[in-house]
Amino acid sequence: MLIKRIKAKNFKTYLDLDLDISTEPDRPIVLIGGANGGGKTTFFDAIYGALYGLKISTSKHFKELLNAGALGVEDEKIQLELHFSGKVLNQEQSYVLTRTYMLNPESKPVESVRLNMNGTIFQYGSATPIAQRAEQEAQVNKIIKANLPEELSRYFLFDAMEAGSLLKEDRLNRVIKENIENVMGFNKYLSLAKVSEKLTQDYTAQRLDLEKEKKEYLELITHKNKLTEDHNLKKEELQIALAYSVSNKEMYDKLKAGFNQESTINNKIGQLETDLENLYKREKLYKDEAGEFVSNIENHICLPKLASSFKNEISLVFKERNDTGSYSAEQISNHLLEEVISKAINYLTETGYQLSGVSVTEVSEIVLKRLKETDTRLKYDFFEPAELRALEKLASENYNNPFPGVQQKKIEMDISIANASKIEQQIRDLKAQVSGNDFSILKAYEDNESKIKRLESEEKDLKKEVEKIQKKIHTYDIPTNEEPDPKFELLKRLQPFFEKVANTLLKSKKEQIQSKMKEDLNSNLAAYKDVISRVELSEDLKDLNFSIYHKSGNEIYLSQLNTASTQVVVQVLLKALHEYGDYDPPVMIDTVMGVLDETSRSTLLENYFPELSHQTILLSSDSEIRPSTDLVKIEPFISKTFTLNRDKELQKTHIAEGYFNQHIN
């Protein structure tokens, strides 16, 4: 793959970029200079975005990427165009890949993509019908992947300042093991081996005579597939955890050094204080309910007990009165009787009877006396009417004892109150974090590291289970009384054949990588120049690592190298992957010198960059590759030089030929 031209319109600092960066075969380097903030990283992002897309999610994100100088002057759209060439089936092809971004009437970002491959056009966008878009997008992605898959781009398009961090705390293994099979070309053979295994399994199932055996075989296959799916999910979960570990390592280190995440901690404090306040409210509500219960305990406890005890006797009282319907003379008061007799005498006098001399009191006494003489006494006549009403209410009242609910709330409150001190302590601890004593991100990161170990163990166990089931599957075979099946015999040989090819390829390339790394480290690693006896690369793709050994026999531990040396080691490894991998992309390096010392800088300039790739794009400040002293060391290998100049007033970057006013011969 060779990048010939990059165009960027209205992208970040570039209002209208159009740059030819093609190289000559014997001059593979394109040197692009610029001061800090001049647009070097944006140039890097423009090439990366043209290849793989900008992945704009919101209108705010779109406006952040839009060049400020384009506002109100031009159509508000971002366009990236990349001209490149590459071989497909050993035939050279020329490509023009264009990606355009804008906001639709609903202010949502939309993308359109156009790829011209030697006159054949593939095109799709947000408005393209789904089926047509899927077909066109698949073709475009296939072409990009054939030249440089996005998952492998980190090995060839990278920031040298970050290269050294790949070795920190054994992070090299985590970062590259997921894609090393693709880089080195092993994956295609392993995929063929898996396909062969699947075909063998299907064919074996078809050839089993006995239905029971076939059922058992298929159940084993289903079980194995389920375990394999679980294994893949576990690996995916592990990769997510590893990605979190890598992406948050810098923040973790900064937080450990004293940086503060006050907003996150304060939000947590507020949440805990709210929980505590709610707890105190529930405590007050419980106290009120308990106080009400105690204050009215006779209504809640005594009266229900009394009603229960005398319910039958009360029923007898009312039953007797209902059965007899009688009233005793004692139930009639003198006052009431006198009032009735008085009204009767008045009525009779008005109707003509001569009763003016009749005494109401005397009549009343006579009536009461006669009533008593004829009175039928009831057993329960001694109750006053008010007492009867009270007894009736006592028996008919619907009592509800709140004690069980109060008791349950007491149990819950005992637990909550016990936790209150813990919440208060947690609040104090979090407030201490605001002062710089501790940070929650540290625990989250360390929990994630523990999770990685757990997932690695679970993934390993699942792998063993898959292998165990696989052995059972292999016990099924074609019955011996049948004629040999050439197709089946061939299928059985294919899987081990492809696995053997992959292993042979690994062994072959392993020796090449080791030899090349030893040669390049002896040339470029200034701290151990010419004293490295060997480099050993592991043969386990799932636990890739390498070791460096001194001529004296001792191992040179990667963890003990300084930052500059680790940068050199990683760049040497990436060069070996580039040279012996299945892809031949250009290499683009931002902040090329990173943290290198004077000796290492010279070594890289003279021995590393000229041989790194058929096209090497270096983005450098004048303090990294110095125009006065360093440029001359790589001048014979440079095809083009440019300088990025940032116009602060117009908010855009201009490009001038030459490297900080120095022109190559």
Image (cartoon, grey):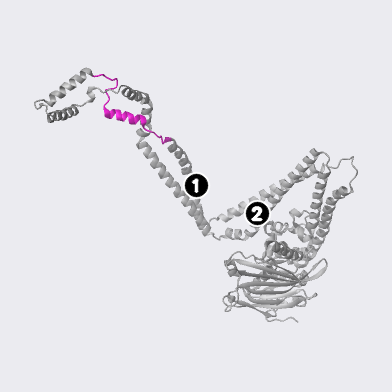
Residue 116 lies left or right of residue 375; in this view the side is: right
Extreme-right residue of the structure: 483
Asked whether 219 falls inside the magenta stretch, the response is no
Depth order, front residue of 8/572: 8
The reply to whether residue 594 is in sight is no
Asked whether 385 falls inside the magenta stretch, the response is yes
Query: What residue is rendered at 48% in x and 54% in y?
Result: 270
Residue 410, numbered circle? none
Check disc 2 and report the residue beneath it.
241
The region drawn magenta spans: 375-403
Tag 1 near tag 2, CB within 8 Å? no
Give coordinates of residue 408: x percent, y percent. 46, 38
Rendering quarter of residue 355: top left
Query: What residue is rendered at 65% in x and 71% in y?
Result: 42
Task: Tell me the CA gap for discs 1 and 2.
Answer: 30 Å
Extreme-front residue of the structure: 352
Residue 422, numbered circle? 1
Question: Which numbered mark, 1 or 2, is in the foreground of this view?
Answer: 2
Residue type, mark 2 in image: Ala
Number of callouts in the render?
2
Give coordinates of residue 203: x percent, y percent. 82, 47
Depth order, front residue of 537/325: 325
Q: Secondary structure at mark 2?
A: helix
